[in-house]
Image (cartoon, helix red, strand yellow):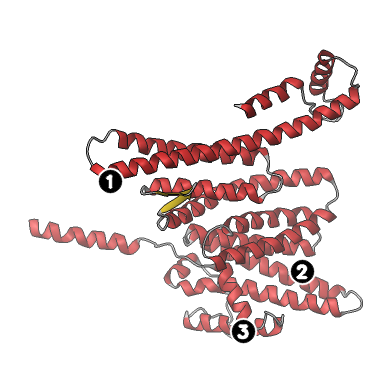
Amino acid sequence: NQTITMASAPMETNADISKEVIPFALNVHEMVMNIQQQHGLRPDNDYVQYRHYLTNRLRRIRTLGNFKYGKGRGFVQHELTIEETRENENLLMIPLLNAERAWSYAMQIKQELELAKKGHGKLTSHLIGRLRKASIYGNEFEKICLSHPADARTCLEATAYASWLKGSLYLEQEKWKESMESFSSALTICKELGTVGTIEQQDLFCSRAESIEQSLRYCNYNLKDDDDINELGALATSGNKAIQSKLDSVLEKARREEAMTLEEVTWRGKTIAIRSQELKVVVLRARAQDEELFKSDNASENLWTKTIGVYDDALKVARESLQALELLTSGGGLVESERKDLKLLCSMLAYKKSQRMQSRHLKLCLQLKKKWKMHVLQHGASSSPEQNNASSSSTSSSGGGSGVVVARAEDLVHLFDALKQ
């Protein structure tokens, strides 16, 4: 009896393992770019050749996967299900290639419209119809990726691809608000994915982000109502929050993979070895946050606060690691060397955090100084400081009819004191 029980347990485990669905990974944008380059789309923009290639490849996939519709009277529309894609992952290419085929047909019609001297209503309707079909297939591809399931990066790429197709459709329909909302979601994902992965992948997503930004500027130009733009900004922010958790998980995974190769950092001519995996991740996070901060010409207050918070977290991890080493009474030269590296790392992080705080305070000082000068010019240089402060307070509380917050003298003094410390 004991032998039978022991033999039956592994059989149940194997059955459970066989039922487990392993997430798949697919570099959507990289694969699409490769087939476009290899089959006539670049640099010749031969959409006819590209569309014929997609048709032939779809036929091969359906034949090999036994996913046929039939001919003549035997034609039956077959909806692709998630279970079928789990059994044969090649079938997942069907909605993606269908979306590409419909999009390429739309671009072919657009070329014909550009060559025509006068507009053609039928061609325009046909163009919008093809883009609508491409958007439907893009949404189907995204839905399957989210339910298959795919890994986080594949889901994000599928969402960006579907949002871009949807934005392109709304752009041709001149639905500027809906187009900006879709393009904003795609832009957020492409910008974040442009910071991780190989150099080729980063270049690809950066170029995609630049092309999407051009479409956004065109929509913004046509959307001249400020109220609509502000409302759209709130919608885009709420939409970005919905995908921010996925972006954070992908970026964190990429940082942990990059941390496997990070061994040391250099500061003031000294090499600091980093042995802890957790320390490597927080140092890389601080480095990435610095790149985002310095890349922006006019960084927002939220970005400054986020950067300083990242350095706070890194300092906390480094000091906790140093405290744990201080409690050790043995270990010899190896422990002493690691303790020395941790002290240097704490000094480096504290110094960089102090630099960011000083830069932030200096920026605020300059902004407040400019506002204070405007306030003095408006209320007259002969008025007393008490009168200026009183008028500043009344303007701030009442809004002054313009919603502009006026700087006060004590605010400037407080910031300059912070700079001197």
Count residues near mark 3 (Cα–Cα under 10 Å), then give few for <14, some for 14-19, many for 20+: some
Distance, label 1 to label 3, CA atoms, is: 62 Å
Q: Which mark is residue 334?
A: 1
> Which callout, 1 or 3, points at the residue further toward the start of the chain?
3
Which of label 1 and label 2 is nearer to you? Answer: 1
For residue 369, side relative to residue 207 (left or right): right
Write down the quadrant of residue 49 in the picture. Answer: bottom right
Write down the quadrant of residue 388 in the picture. Answer: top right
The secondary structure type at the circle numbered 1 is helix
Q: Which residue is mark 2?
A: 128
Give residue 75's position: percent from left, percent from top. 59, 81
Q: Which mark is residue 53?
A: 3
Give residue 105's position: percent from left, percent from top. 71, 77
Distance, label 1 to label 2, CA atoms, is: 68 Å
Give residue 326's position: percent from left, percent from top. 31, 34
> Which callout, 1 or 2, points at the residue further toward the start of the chain?
2
